């Protein structure tokens, strides 16, 4: 028994409805270590719902969600907390705490999970902000940052726990092309330097091109096609094609 270390994330026949709205009808997915899977799908098809199921914020009606080889909904609380520590989530909105400075935003998860001393806090916050090019804004409030800076601050706050998995929900949406490219580049370097396993939900084809090892296309509650970018971009299916032109 145990975890062979190959598929870090594995969804098996996941279904999720909200009342009569059947959003996920049969979602299966494997993401292997170090891989970046990009999820494409029209607005409202359930991409964010899938990410929330992977992180355990939302429980499927049926099906199995395994992360690091374990069913996350059967983990004892301490193990679940550890799983959450190892799994970073970059929300669609960035989700910074508005009443805290950037420094305090980054300290927050560290204090919650490790409660380290002042020196360690300073060192880690500095390093993480430096990694995303935001060190100069350490004492700013989120309201003083631009959209792209907020995304970067959100990423820094996620990276500070040194996760092994990163889930990105529309990391470049609402940003200008140059800033989007900066964020995509940042995602790429995080993947490479940390051998990160990632799932990226995006509409941004530049981001797909720069980050995807594999693409999965969501339609009518299931993945219709999954494959390497070269295959998906050549697909004849009109729905799949619609993302690339
Ligand atoms: N907590 C919830 N309660 C009720 N319905 C929900 C909830 N979360 C999502 N839904 C519904 O599930 C469907 C999929 O939502 P989801 O946010 O996953 O879409 P999405 O693919 O991420 O879209 P977008 O590209 O616009 O972000 C929508 O119909 C939405 O209304
Ligand atoms: Mg969404």
Image (cartoon, rainbow, N blue to C red):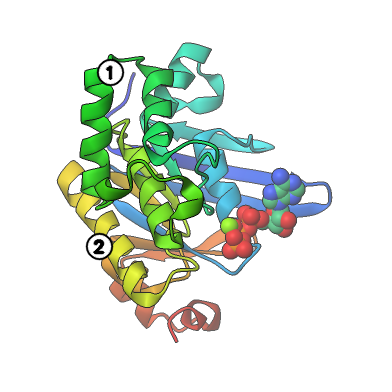
Q: Is mark 1 within 8 Å of ligand 2?
A: no
Q: Residue furthest right?
A: 20
Q: Is mark 2 within 8 Å of ligand 2?
A: no
Q: Residue shown at 43%/58% (left/top)?
A: 171
Residue 88 is situated, as x and y percent measured from the top left of the image, at: 40, 38
Q: Nearer the viewer, residue 209 or 224?
A: 209
Q: Are marks 1 and 2 in contact (CB under 8 Å)?
A: no
Q: As displayed, is residue 245 above or below residue 198?
A: below
Front one among 214 and 132: 132
The reply to whether residue 222 is in sight is: yes
Query: Quick check: 70 above or below 19?
Result: above
190 left or right of 59 in image: left
Residue placed most toward the observer, 1 or 217: 217
Going from the N terminus, do you reach mark 1 or mark 2 first?
A: 1
In-image side of 67 versus 222 (left or right): left
Q: Quadrant of the C terminus?
A: bottom left
Q: Residue at x 27, y 43 (%)?
A: 129
**Image coordinates for residue 41, horizontal then vertical, percent:** 54, 66
Q: Residue at x 27, y 29 (%)?
A: 4
Above or below residue 238? Residue 88 is above
Instruction: Please name the residue that numbered disc 2 is placed on.
Output: 185
Q: Which residue is mark 1?
A: 118
Name the element at disc 2.
helix
Q: Quadrant of the N terminus?
A: top left
Marks 1 and 2: which is nearer the front? 1
Where in the figure is residue 11, as x and y percent of width and height?
A: 49, 42
Residue for point 38% across, 47% down: 153
Give the quarter of the image for residue 98.
Answer: top right
Q: How many marks?
A: 2
Q: Residue furthest left?
A: 193
Q: Is residue 73 left or right of residue 112?
A: right
């Amino acid at each position: 028994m145990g975890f062979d270390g190959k598929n870090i994330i594995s969804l098996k026949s996941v279904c999720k409805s909200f009342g009569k709205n059947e959003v996920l009808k049969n979602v299966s997915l494997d993401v292997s270590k170090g891989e970046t899977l990009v999820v494409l799908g029209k607005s409202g098809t359930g991409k964010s719902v899938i990410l929330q199921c992977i992180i355990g914020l939302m429980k499927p009606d049926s099906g199995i969600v395994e992360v690091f080889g374990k069913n996350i909904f059967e983990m004892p609380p301490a193990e679940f907390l550890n799983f959450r520590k190892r799994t970073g989530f970059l929300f669609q909105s960035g989700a910074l705490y508005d009443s805290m400075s950037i420094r305090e935003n980054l300290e927050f998860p560290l204090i919650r999970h490790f409660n380290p001393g002042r020196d360690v806090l300073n060192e880690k916050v500095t390093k993480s902000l430096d990694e995303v090019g935001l060190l100069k804004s350490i004492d700013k409030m989120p309201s003083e940052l631009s959209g792209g800076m907020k995304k970067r601050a959100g990423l820094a706050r996620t990276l500070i726990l040194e996760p092994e998995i990163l889930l990105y929900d529309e990391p470049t949406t609402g940003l200008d092309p140059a800033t989007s490219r900066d964020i995509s580049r940042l995602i790429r370097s995080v993947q490479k330097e940390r051998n990160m396993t990632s799932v990226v939900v995006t509409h941004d084809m530049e981001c797909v091109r720069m980050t995807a090892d594999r693409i999965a296309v969501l339609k009518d509650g299931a993945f219709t096609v999954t494959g390497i970018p070269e295959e998906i971009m050549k697909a004849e299916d009109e729905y799949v094609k619609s993302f690339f032109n």
